[in-house]
Amino acid sequence: MGGGDVGSAFDAALARTGTSLTSRDLVAMYPSQPSLADNSPIDLERCKSFDLFNADPAKARDEMEKKREDAQKLHGAEFIRQLKRSKHHHPLKKNRQFDFRLTQEERSTLAATGVVASQRMQAESFAEIYYRLYTDDLPVYVTTDSILHAWHRSFDAFLVELELLLSPLLDKIVSSTLYQCKTLLSKADPHVAIAMKDVDNFLTVGLSLLRGETPSNLTSLWTALGAEKTADVEMFSSKRTIDFSLFKPRGHYTKSEALKNYFRAMMWLGTIDFRIAGGENQQDDLHQLLCAVVLVQCLQESDSLSDIERADSLISCLVADGNLGADSLSAHELAKLVIPTNIASSILSKLGPDRETLLLDLQQQIVQKGLGTQLITGHPLVEDATAGTTTPTTRPTSFALLGQRFVWSSFIFTRLVYDQVLQDDTKPARRIPSAVD
């Protein structure tokens, strides 16, 4: 389970504070400290270097030209020519190009608050602004947001390269596992064959998305996926509501077809989960648990378990907060429960009641260990009508092939929308977080 003990710690904190806290209560709990600063306006003319920023570029150039002429009279024309060609800094090499003067309104804001953001001087990047200051040889204040911007751009570029390297590995894992699933399907008993067919469909869609191909036998599901809207579809032999808008590529994933395909495939393999306990119907839960066992067995027999563990570990190192892992039961975790003990083989070979008994025992073991407990909502869930107004809808215990990572921002925002928000024993219809949350 991603998030460790975050969920229980959050519930304990919520129990201490209650659900009737108002904005005034919050302010009272965390009172602001009185400001020690002098509130009188800043005298900008006395501020160091303000005269440089406030200079008229044309006048500054004229003054600099006059200084160079005086220097030429004193030291000769050759001195000025060598000075201009020199790589070393010299005050006489300055040549103002950009106008950094503030308007009267901007000056008033700066004097009153100590900071002003001038939209007139905006540029395409931090680098462009720094280059302008460097070119005009003006004092530079390096801000943390510009450093973070550079870090994020570097990380984004690194992530693109890594994902393009991961894509062939993902293709190998899914294709070899799918081949093994089809091999086992040909000799499975009817009940297991249904689960294997569900796993076959799941892997077929994932591989088709990764390769940019259209599967021939999953028309309705593929149509819903292409529409990129919320729709009810059949998934693992039961009805499920899926938000297909999540599959629309965004950010750096729009830069190439390969990245678009990788994004859609990872969204499928990460958010289409096997709901193995805590669902609306116990038989559906057991069937999806059987599907999960089938998938892990196919990974094992296709020698793909180590590859999926390697890919999963690498993704967690890059995008999971605090290396807390996926917000679901992973293939590696389930394999440790069913492969060494031969439970997987027993489940697939047993008949009727014996198989169900093994699945129930496995399900109980997973739940008791807290494995697969979700803290973040992905696709829409049906609200529990029996829970009333005082209990948030519980997420089912989940298994995913490459489950999405636990990220603090996702966890927090999940707790700030319906139906996780409780106030005075009611659930406010709060569909999206507030900008001030």
Image (cartoon, rainbow, N blue to C red):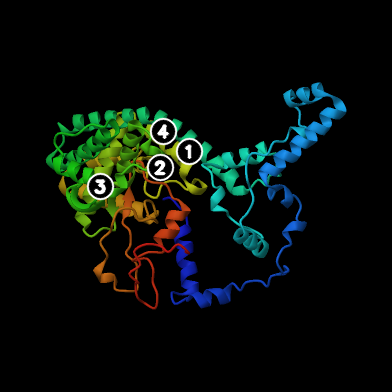
Q: Which amino acid does label 1 sit on?
A: Asp
**Which label's residue is closer to the chain start, 3 or 4?**
4
**Which label's residue is closer to the chain start, 1 or 2?**
1
Residue name at image x 34 percent, y 44 percent: 270
Q: Do the residues bearing badges 2 and 4 touch, measured as CB atoms within 8 Å? A: no
Q: Do the residues bearing badges 1 and 3 touch, measured as CB atoms within 8 Å? A: no
* Residue placed most toward the observer, 246 or 197: 246
On the rendered structure, is 305 left or right of 143?
left
Q: Which amino acid does label 3 sit on?
A: Glu
Mark nearest the camera among 3 and 4 is: 3
Cα separation, mark 4 vs mark 1, equals 10 Å
Residue located beneath label 1 in the image: 156
Task: Tell me where residue 305 appears, x and y as whole percent.
Answer: 36, 33
Residue name at image x 23 percent, y 37 percent: 205
Decide: few, some or many residues near mark 2? Use Cα within 10 Å; few <14, some 14-19, many ≥20.
few
Q: Which amino acid does label 2 sit on?
A: Gly
- Relative to 69, does residue 140 appear above or below in the rendering? below
Residue name at image x 46 percent, y 69 percent: 14
Residue located beneath label 2 in the image: 251
Mark 1 lies on a secondary structure that is: helix
Residue located beneath label 4 in the image: 163
Residue 258 image-quadrant placement: top left
**Which label's residue is closer to the chain start, 3 or 2?**
3
Examine the rendering and report whether any part of residue 358 can be seen: no
Mark nearest the camera among 4 and 1 is: 1
Residue located beneath label 3 in the image: 228
Cα separation, mark 1 vs mark 3, equals 25 Å
**Which label's residue is closer to the chain start, 1 or 3?**
1
Q: Which amino acid does label 4 sit on?
A: Glu
Decide: few, some or many residues near mark 4? Use Cα within 10 Å; few <14, some 14-19, many ≥20.
some
Q: Do the residues bearing badges 1 and 2 touch, measured as CB atoms within 8 Å? A: yes
